[in-house]
Image (tube, coloured by chain):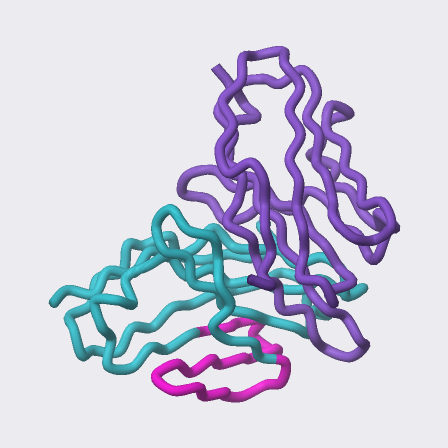
C-alpha cells in the first residue's frame, strides 16, 4: 500500500463548478497534511495546510481532514481555467521529518 | 529574490558521466530536502538535512547518489556514473522548523537531468 494515494484523474469540471480532490494516507499517526499545486513544467507550490480534523477555508479553497478515516480532501469553489493544474497531496510522516507526496490529480477546468 | 534557487536548470549528459546540482535554500530555513520527480508522478523523497546534518536518505537511492550541506547553507547533490534511468527533474525544497506542526515546503524551480 502506498503511503499517500490519490486518483490520478484527469478530473474535468466546468468553469464555476466545485472541484473535489481526494487523498488517503496509510500511517494513522500522521499529523500534518498539505495540498500543493503544480502547473505543467513548474515546481510545486503550497496552497493549503491542515493539522486538525474538520475544515479549513482559505478563499476559494477548503481543505478537509478526517483522521479516523485517514482521508484528506480539497474543494475548489468557483473553479477557474487558471486552476487547471496537478494537485499533490502531501503528508509528513511520524517523526516530523519526511514529507511524502501522492502521485497527484490532474484537474482541468473547462471555460 | 529570496526564494530557493537551483543550478543548473537543465543538464544533458552522457551515460556514465558524473553530474552535480546545487541548491541555495531560503536563508533563514534550517531544513533542506531533495526530491526527484518523473513525468506523471509526485515528487519522490531522496534525502533531507536539518542544518548541516543529513538525517535521512531514501532506501531507493543507490550509492551513486550523494548529498552534502556544508555549514548548513547551500547543498549539492551528486550523481556518479549516470544511467538513463536517472533522467528526471531534481527538486530542492527548504522549510523552517521551529517546533510544532509545521513543515511547509518551498520549492526551487528544479534541475532537469537528461542522460543520453
Q: Quadrant of residue A98?
A: bottom right
In the figure, what tint was chain B given?
A: purple
Residue lying at 42% horizontally and 67% vertically, measured from the top left = A22
Residue lying at 72% horizontally and 63% vertically, measured from the top left = B27
| Residue B4, position as x, y percentages in the image | 60, 56
Furthest toward the left, the residue is A111
* A75 over B16 or under it: above or below: below
Q: Please report the bounds of the magenta region as a residue range.
A: A51-73
Say left or right for B48 vs A48. Answer: right
| Residue B22, position as x, y percentages in the image | 66, 40
| Residue A54, position as x, y percentages in the image | 53, 88
Say left or right for B111 vs B34. Answer: left
| Residue A12, position as x, y percentages in the image | 21, 62
Residue lying at 28% horizontally and 62% vertically, measured from the top left = A84
Q: Nearer the viewer, residue B40 or A84?
A: A84
Q: Nearer the viewer, residue B85 or B70?
A: B70
- Tally the marks: 0
Q: Quadrant of residue B79?
A: top right
* B62 over B56 or under it: above or below: above
Q: Is residue A59 magenta?
A: yes
Q: Is residue B50 magenta?
A: no
Say left or right for B1 vs A74. Answer: right
Say left or right for B2 vs A35. Answer: right
Furthest toward the front, the residue is B1
Chain appearing in cyan on the rendered image: A
Residue lying at 49% horizontally and 63% vertically, measured from the top left = A45
* B29 over B62 or under it: above or below: below
Amino acid at each position: 500500500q502506498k503511503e499517500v494515494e490519490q486518483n490520478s484523474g484527469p478530473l474535468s469540471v466546468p468553469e464555476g463548478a466545485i472541484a473535489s480532490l481526494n487523498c488517503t494516507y496509510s500511517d494513522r499517526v500522521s499529523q500534518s497534511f498539505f495540498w500543493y499545486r503544480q502547473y505543467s513544467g513548474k515546481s510545486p507550490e503550497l496552497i493549503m495546510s491542515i493539522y486538525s480534523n474538520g475544515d479549513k477555508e482559505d478563499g476559494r479553497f477548503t481543505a478537509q481532514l478526517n483522521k479516523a478515516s485517514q482521508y484528506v480532501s480539497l474543494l475548489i469553489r468557483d473553479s477557474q481555467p487558471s486552476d487547471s493544474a496537478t494537485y499533490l497531496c502531501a503528508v509528513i510522516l511520524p517523526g516530523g521529518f519526511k514529507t511524502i507526496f501522492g502521485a497527484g490529480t490532474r484537474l482541468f477546468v473547462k471555460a | 529574490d529570496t526564494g530557493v534557487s537551483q543550478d543548473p536548470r537543465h543538464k544533458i549528459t552522457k551515460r556514465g558521466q558524473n553530474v552535480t546540482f546545487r541548491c541555495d535554500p531560503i536563508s533563514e530555513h534550517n531544513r533542506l530536502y531533495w526530491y526527484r520527480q518523473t513525468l506523471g508522478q509526485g515528487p519522490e523523497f531522496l534525502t533531507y538535512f536539518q542544518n548541516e546534518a543529513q538525517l535521512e536518505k531514501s532506501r531507493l537511492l543507490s550509492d551513486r547518489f550523494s548529498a552534502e550541506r556544508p555549514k548548513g547553507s547551500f547543498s549539492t547533490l551528486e550523481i556518479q556514473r549516470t544511467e538513463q534511468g536517472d533522467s528526471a527533474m531534481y527538486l530542492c525544497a527548504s522549510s523552517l522548523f521551529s517546533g510544532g506542526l509545521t513543515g511547509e515546503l518551498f520549492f526551487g524551480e528544479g534541475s532537469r537531468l537528461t542522460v543520453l
